[in-house]
Amino acid sequence: MKNILITGGAGFIGSHVVRLFVTKYPDYHIVNLDKLTYAGNLANLADIERAENYTFVKADICDFDTILDLLRRYEIDGIIHLAAESHVDRSIKDPFTFARTNVMGTLSLLQAARLYWESLPERYEGKRFYHISTDEVYGALELTRLEGGDEPGGGPFGDDFFVETTKYNPHSPYSASKASSDHFVRAFHDTYGMPTIVTNCSNNYGPYQFPEKLIPLFINNIRHRKPLPVYGKGENVRDWLYVEDHARAIDIIFHRGGVAETYNIGGFNEWKNIDLIKVIIKTVDRLLGNEEGASLDLITYVTDRAGHDLRYAIDSTKLKTELGWEPSLQFEEGIERTVRWYLDNQSWLDNITSGDYEKYYDEMYKQR
Ligand code: NAD
Ligand code: TYD
């Protein structure tokens, strides 16, 4: 497999996947297709943008003709599809955008891949359509253990976990749109024989995450001594995975995963939001040289998110048993690395809050 299309490569997870593939596989040509919505930031890829095996294309996955043309022009053998609208709070305010990109966009990509690959003599031989999805499609788990065990983060907070056969039960417009796209991907395998793979991953954290999501938002707010808005009582549980571990899993699954298979990806690392927030505060205060607990007073309990899922927890045993993947990083180390990265790259955060990051494409690409 030589020519790989990665969609959404200018976003948080996509930029880590693009970097990994461009540096690890010099023989592959990596085409990064991204619309550069508010969440796309080419500065995330500044270190590899001049690599010979890398091409960036600004395009919308909903634009069927452009996608088909691109697949033909670059003779794409494999697709790793990450482009999506990804923030639950935005989906509550504007569900249409989520249906458009996540559902219709995925369908347009699938249909373009089908037409292109079916036109080749080898058809689907050596081809792969890998769709990146979320654990949120499974709905919410009960919180039956109020105190956790000896696991990292104090979890698990219940006896049940999401497994690959858990029934879909999405609650937010975001997770409903992702669930719908997952169904389309599987339908293209079942109907046309397209070699597809779907993975469902837990919450990611790490460098280059847009500062509307919990961890970078709170690091940025602590830096500016702004309130930290905790939804509800802060008792919701999320299962956190370092983004580079997710990218490593994607690499393994893309190359060795079984056709039509689903794999759950997660770190067995459950945290109640409020406990996680206290770890973030402690780490940021220490690294900024503040007195311990100096920023605890910024915690501000606010109205809960509508339909707020109580607990997510992934069982990734299948991935470990079948393909040997495990998370490499302890959470404490991951959080330390993450906080350090945001504090060492404050201009990256400031460029986003000022809106300057949106000029990057014009400056770096349009004039070429
Ligand atoms: P992100 O919001 O940081 O990035 C999304 C990228 O997609 C951006 O670069 C954006 O410009 C691009 N994009 C959006 N609409 C597009 C369109 N119509 N055409 C082309 N490009 C478009 O998202 P992320 O957190 O990196 O998530 C990437 C994928 O992983 C998503 O599919 C998401 O559902 C999934 N996922 C995310 C998490 C997480 O914790 N962030 C966990 C599990 C799965
Ligand atoms: P988020 O990072 O938006 O990811 P997701 O909703 O996909 O899990 O939120 C993580 C958790 O943090 C979630 O339970 C909602 C909560 N949260 C807050 O309490 N305050 C905030 O400002 C944000 C953005 C999230």
Image (cartoon, grey):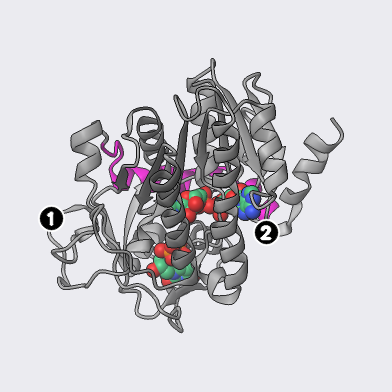
Q: Looking at the rendering, in which quadrant would you find the C terminus?
A: top right
Per the rendering, the mark at residue 39 is none
The percent position of residue 62, horizontal first and vertical second, equals 65, 53
- The reply, left or right, for residue 260 in relation to residue 148 is right
Q: Quadrant of residue 159?
A: bottom left
Q: Quadrant of residue 110?
A: top right
Query: Which numbered disc flags the more N-terminal residue, 2 or 1?
Result: 1
Residue at image point 31% right, 42% down: 261
The percent position of residue 45, horizontal first and vertical second, equals 62, 35
Q: Give the labeled residue for mark 1.
A: 150
* Within-10-Å neighbours for mark 2: few <14, some 14–19, many 20+: few
Q: Is residue 154 visible?
A: yes
The image shows a total of numbered marks equal to 2
User: Up-down: is 128 above or below 246?
Assistant: above
Check disc 1 and report its element: helix, strand or loop.
Answer: loop
Q: Nearer the viewer, residue 76 or 358?
A: 76
Name the residue at the top extreme: 27
Check disc 2 and report its element: helix, strand or loop.
Answer: helix
**Magenta segment:** 326-352
Q: Amino acid at mark 2?
A: Thr
Q: Amino acid at mark 1?
A: Asp
Residue at image point 35% right, 72% down: 309
Q: Nearer the viewer, residue 104 or 37?
A: 104
Per the rendering, the mark at residue 353 is 2
> How far is mark 2 from mark 1, CA to CA?
39 Å
